[in-house]
Amino acid sequence: MKDFFLSIIIPAYNEEEVLNQTIERLTAVMEREEYHYELLFVNDGSKDATLRLLEEASAKDERIKYLSFSRNFGHQAAVSAGIDACTGDAVVIIDADLQDPPEVIPQMVALWQEGNDVVYGKRKSRDGESFFKTFTAKAFYRVLNSLSSVDIPLDTGDFRLIDRKVADVLRGLPEKNRFLRGLVSWIGFRQVPCEFSRDARAAGETKYTMKKMINLAIDGILSFSSAPLRLMAKFGFLIVFISAALFVYTIVSLCLGSTAAGWASLMTVITFFGGTNFVAIGLLGEYVARIYDEAKGRPNYIVDKRGNFKDE
C-alpha cells in the first residue's frame, strides 16, 4: 500500500445508467495501484435512482461515501462540497460520466509525487462531442484568457488532482458564483498538465445543458475579469466622439444649406444606441447580482443525506 491517502470526488446528477460502471472502474484503478482511498460521490439532487445506487454501494464498501443535496445546486457546488468533506493528502476531481478516464489518475499521482501541487487534465481530443460544443469550448477559453489577468489553461475541465494545501485554500474561499478551474489557477502553486484523450459518455446523455454551459461561461468571465465593464466604458467614449462628430457635421450641413438626413437613419442611430445602453445596463446588472449573492451569505449547498462518514 502507498503511504498517502487519496480522495476521489465524483459529482453526479441523474447518472443511474453509468454509476455502477463508474464505481467499478474507479475501484479497479485504486486496487491495482494499491492506494489508500475514498470514493466521495456528491449527489446533486438527482431525480432518478442515483441516490439509491449510492446507498447500496456504500453499504457494501465503507470506502464509498456520499453526500446528497436537498436539491440541485449545480456542478460547481457539488465539487465544492466534495472538497469541503474530503480528507485525502491529494484530491482528484472527476465526473461520473466516464468521459474523463479513471485510468489517467495514476499518471496524475506520479506527477504530484514529483512535487507538483496541481495536475490538471488537458484534453488532446474530445470523442463523442459535436463540432459545435468543441468549437464553443475552445473559443470560450481563448476569450476568457484574453480578458482575464489570470492564465487559465486551455482545453481543460475540472478533471484534476490537487494537493491537500490547495484543497484547504479552496475551502477558505467564500465566494458563491464559483468557477473552480479558474479559482485553482488564481491561487497559484506549482501546476502542470497531464494530457489525455477524452472519451464519449459510457452511457446516457449529458446532463450539462446549453443553459448550464452558458451560465458557467458567464460565471467564468465575470468572476475573473472586469474587462467587460471597461470595454463598455471605452465604447461609451467612442459613442460620445461619434455623436460630437455628427453634431459638427449637422451644423456644417445646415450652414451650407443642405437638408438633414431622413427619419430612417435617425431611428437606426437611436435604436442602436438604445440597445447599447440596455446591454451596458444588463452587464452592470450581472456584476451587481453577484455582489447581491455574496451579501446574502447563503451557503453554496445544503446536504440532506450522507453515508459512511465517521461522525455519523
Image (spheres, helix red, strand yellow):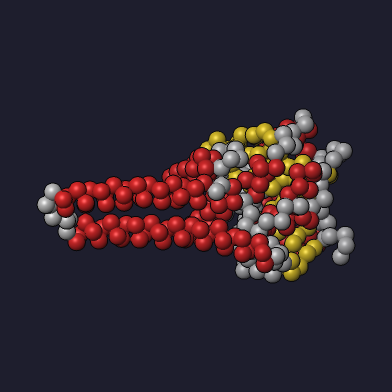
Residue 147 lies left or right of residue 185; in this view the side is left
Locate the C terminus and report the quarter of the image it occupies.
bottom right
Seen in the picture, residue 168 relative to 33 is either above or below; the reply is: below
User: In the depicted view, which residue is nearer to us: 197 or 288?
Assistant: 288
Task: Specify whether residue 49 is in view.
Answer: no
Specify whether 166 is left or right of 205.
right
Task: Name the residue located 78 percent from the left edge and 38 percent from the top edge.
Answer: 33
Residue 282 in sight in this render: yes
User: Quadrant where the N terminus lies?
Assistant: top right
Work out which residue is located at the far front of the displayed protein and give it: 255
Determine the residue positioned at 70% across, 38% down: 188
Whole-percent x, y for residue 134 in the image:
47, 44
Residue lying at 38% horizontally and 56% vertically, measured from the top left: 276
Give the percent coordinates (x, y) of residue 293. Answer: 63, 63
Q: Which of 28 and 102 is in front in this view?
A: 102
Viewer-closest of 26 and 154: 154
To which quarter of the image does residue 91 belong?
A: top right
| Numbered label tally | 0
| x 72%, y 45%: residue | 92
Residue found farthest to the left: 257
Q: In this view, does 13 lie to the left or right of 282?
A: right
Percent of width and height locating residue 211: 50, 59
**Residue situated in front as seen by the camera: 30 or 216:** 216
Q: Where is residue 142 in the image (x, y as percent from the top left)?
A: 50, 40
